[in-house]
Amino acid sequence: MNDPEIHAAASRLRSLLAEPPELFIVLGSGLGAVAGAVEDRVEVPFTDLTGLPDATVTGHAGRFVGGRLEGRPVLVQSGRYHAYEGHPYDVVVAPLRIAHRAGAGAFLVTNAAGGIREGMTPGDIVLISDHLNFHFASGLRGRVRDGEVRFPDMTEAYDRGLRAHARAVADEVGVPVSEGVYASMPGPAFETPAEVRMLRTLGADLVGMSTVPSVTVARARGMRVLGMSMVTNVAAGLGEGVLDHEEVMEVGRSGGERLETLVRGIVARWDDAPPAP
């Protein structure tokens, strides 16, 4: 999507919301429970905004949900686009650009991920501390877009202060969390055991097929980012049996209550988070 299309979609979305969002939240496969907690909700299917196609992956609802979560104005993206669906990267990252243009200054992103680090089990929640980009492409490719910089600093792509805030909230609400490095692969096949061994050697703790393209654009737009993965399966070659997308979604749904509790606590105490560096 080009800048005029982004501006038009953001203007249309903003006209449907009671107030501009402060926080943009993206939900991964099977992790849609948070959207149901939004009060005074307004639901906007992606296809109601010019230039956005429908989401096609099972477990991704394909809509924006605006309203208030724990008293704070938010915009929730329930479902996301992936390059493996055939979308160009400017479409994959378009919802992030639209949300920022509509007013969101921070980005809370969740995903379902395979666990690579020894000891990880399905249901674990991991705060993303850094990432590895194996898409070998970027939503920033091409001319510099309105509101973005050419070479964003990715030293701290995932905000250290927001991670500290998330850990403090997790302790309070009794949801165990750890931190880890997320590797983003292009998909749509699950990784081979050899690829998982490679990723472990390179320092990855988690693997998935999303998140990184939007995080990169968010940083180019100056947004603070907090990323969280729910481990929905042990990565290939590290456990028994075959990997199945339906099982990934089921673990996401069964663990969704704990993730919702954590997200709601983080949002409720957002003002307690350390300021941006």
Image (cartoon, grey):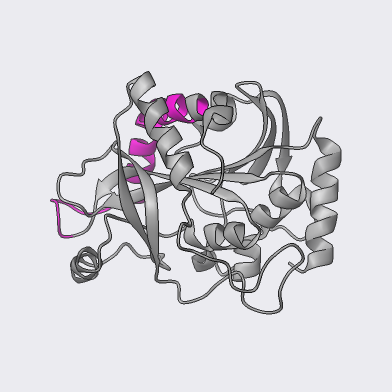
Residue toward you, 4 or 255: 4
How far from the left and from the top, in percent, is residue 177?
Answer: 31, 35
Q: Most extreme residue toward the bottom, as rendered? A: 142
The residue depicted at 53 percent of the width and 46 percent of the height is 60
Q: How many marks?
A: 0
Quick check: 100 left or right of 270?
A: right
Residue 126 among magenta residues: no
Residue toward you, 276 or 138: 276
How far from the left and from the top, in percent, is residue 26?
Answer: 55, 44
User: In the rendered image of this protein, does residue 264 appear above or below residue 153?
Assistant: above
Q: Quadrant of residue 174?
A: top left
The residue depicted at 26 percent of the width and 53 percent of the height is 243
Determine the main secondary structure of the stretch shown in magenta.
helix
Regarding residue 187, the answer to whether it shows in the image is yes
Regarding residue 29, the answer to whether it shows in the image is no
Quick check: 11 left or right of 35?
A: right
Q: Most extreme residue toward the front, as rendered? A: 277
* Region rendered in magenta: 237-264
Residue 261 among magenta residues: yes
User: What is the quadrant of the N terminus in the image?
Assistant: bottom right
The residue depicted at 56 percent of the width and 55 percent of the height is 56
How far from the left and from the top, in percent, is residue 92?
Answer: 60, 62
Residue toward you, 99 or 185: 99
How far from the left and from the top, in percent, is residue 155?
Answer: 45, 62
Q: Quadrant of residue 40?
A: top right
Quick check: 149 left or right of 17?
A: left
Residue toward you, 1 or 155: 155
